[in-house]
Amino acid sequence: MNLFTSFMLTSMFMLLLPIIMSNTQLYKNNLYPHYVKTTISYAFAISMIPAMMFVSSGQETIVSNWHWLSIQTLKLSLSFKLDYFSIIFIPVALFVTWSIMEFSMWYMHTDPYINRFFKYLLMFLITMMILVTANNLFQLFIGWEGVGIMSFLLIGWWYGRADANTAALQAILYNRIGDVGFITAMAWFLANMNAWDFQQIFITQHKNLNIPLLGLLLAATGKSAQFGLHPWLPSAMEGPTPVSALLHSSTMVVAGVFLLIRFHPLMEQNKTMQTLTLCLGAITTLFTAICALTQNDIKKIVAFSTSSQLGLMIVTIGINQPYLAFLHICTHAFFKAMLFMCSGSIIHSLNDEQDIRKMGGLYKPMPFTTSSLIIGSLALTGMPFLTGFYSKDLIIETANTSYTNAWALSVTLIATSLTAAYSTRIMFFALLGQPRFNSLSPINENNPHLINSIKRLLVGSIFAGYLISHNIPPTTIPQMTMPHYLKLTALAMTITGFILALELNLAAKNLKFKYPSNLFKFSNLLGYFPTVMHRLPSTMSLTMSQKSASMLLDMIWLESVLPKSISHFQMKMSTIVSNQKGLVKLYFLSFMITLTLSLLLLSFHE
Amino acid sequence: MSMVYVNMFLAFIMSLMGLLMYRSHLMSSLLCLEGMMLSLFIMMTVTILNNHFTLASMTPIILLVFAACEAALGLSLLVMVSNTYGTDYVQNLNLLQC
């Protein structure tokens, strides 16, 4: 009997302490952010112990503490599932959050409500932990909704800005559409299997699982910004950079992928669902990579990069490799958070300048940020033996050697080269060349908070892939033998993307900007998707309801059909038919004379 | 013929003359229409009562009802004319417009 569950629950409970303390004096002084950061670092250290235990002995636990209620035959209790996925994800998430908290101590330093910011970030982390360790769908839904609410509060942090409020509302609405799918799945499981616990769902045999799996796919589409419900993710960049780094790159948006990974025993048998997932992920990754090519805001490019990687994770689930998708989640968290933090460092140093057309030549004044940005981009594109290589290259190899949809495969490969292209674009415009920014901004990256946090994630971006993939228990066996051209595909596509983008950027650097072509406009306006989908359906439904309620019912059926039409008809007919002149007295007089004359004549007739 | 009937018949003829010969106001012909209705009503009632014509006893009531309807129609026409022209002079009705 070891201390596995004690350590894990202690680590979880420690995260609650700063929230509980928020009513006391501790919340009001300016050491509160430091307190939160140290709490999270201790929680990370403590959660590494169960992770080591799991690595060495493969021990998994399910903790069912408290029986809440039983609704007829459904038993709802508070239960934590500490299996392969949770145990590895929790230390990774805590490590990344620790670095982000330290970064936001530098970034949000001048904000008067910094304590509330840290409290919100911590509440988000707690709900994410609830989501990841949930053993039944009800607890998962609590975590699901919790991350949605905290995302809303954090995107709209600067609520005086109208765009931020719109973006927060957009995030909530798109997530809600996904929640419809989640609740469909919950209702189906309740009605057909009488359980919301994973163990019972995975054991019972059932013939046709299309409906709940479609519901779960819709939920993942909403939460992980797949094609169709994706516009909220680039709009969510209205929030502060630590929020983008934590929520919209590492943690919240992987909740949808995590849900599908949790249900992998059900998805293994259903070929239709796998094909659907594969095609959805493929179109997402290509579409968002195309949109990222012509954006000018550095945070939006990184947001589209996140969206593209999420599509790649969904593709991995579609080829029936949930463990690879999970590995990609863990490794992606490191370098994506670091990319966001480097962007935040650049933005703050240039006095809140986010347009890459106004940056340039930062490799001399900001060497540390430059090197970490370049390492992060290389890790993102899958440079051999950095972090991204261990997951991304394995995914591409497995997709190449499996019996899968050729369109989805080729689209994923094209998106891989586009990843390299837009990464080159960021590096070229922001870091290289001559400066294009206002020369009066004091560029300073010497703050220890900034340096330490990025340094930690830098070490993670380089080594974490190796460490994680060599220490996890064996899962599905990766393909070991393949022809050499398949093995080198990912590397070749990436190098192609790099070279093409570099050549194009260098060649077009001093050319005059002509009017944008149609392809450029398609890419820059996000494929016209928000322009069309945010205006057309709402206009159509509102116009239709106005026409049917007001015009059809009121004005036509109640006014025009009987009353007005009768009066109109009568008047028209009378004016057409009559040919009189209106000499009323003459007509009456002639009537009377005729009457009198006839009476006189007839009465004196014999 | 007895004097009563001649009297009422003369009243009817007077009202008819008044309906067909008037100077300017449309209202006066409407009033004479009411007079015609009144004399008809009395004549009908007296005849039925004198001849003990029991089965036709409801006819005066029916006559009253129809006369009320026609009076309402006449008045509404008067109101329409008065809305357009301000008065009910008959010489206004020369355009065949409403």
Image (cartoon, rainbow, N blue to C red):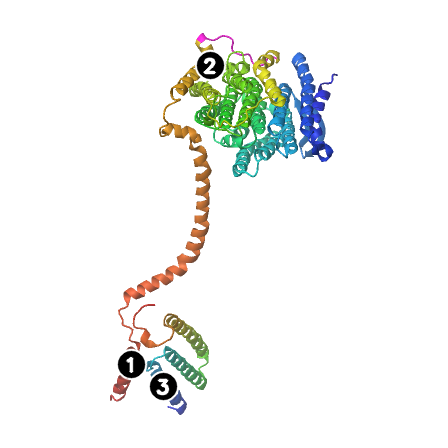
**Label 2 residue SS:** helix
Q: Which residues are magenta?
A: A473-484
Residue type (three-letter) at the residue carrying disc 3: Met
Residue A52 is left or right of residue B6, and the answer is right
| Vertical side of A79 occupied by A323: above or below | above
Q: Do the numbered discs 2 and 1 sit on residues whose CB atoms are within 8 Å? A: no
- Which of these two is toward me, B6 or A539? A539
Q: Which residue is mark 2?
A: A490
Residue B58 seen by the camera: yes
| Circle 2 or circle 1, nearest the eye | 2
Circle on res. B14: 3
| Circle 3 or circle 2, nearest the eye | 2
Which chain contains the residue that carries disc 3? B
In the rendered image, the residue lying farthest to the right is A1
> Gap in Å between the C-alphas at discs 2 and 1?
110 Å
Residue A175, image x, y percentages:
55, 33
| Vertical side of B87 occupied by A549: above or below | above
Residue type (three-letter) at the residue carrying disc 2: Ala
Disc 3 residue crowd, few under 14, some 14–19, many 20+, Cα 10 Å: some
Quarter where residue A527 is shown: top left
> Gap in Å between the C-alphas at discs 3 and 1?
14 Å
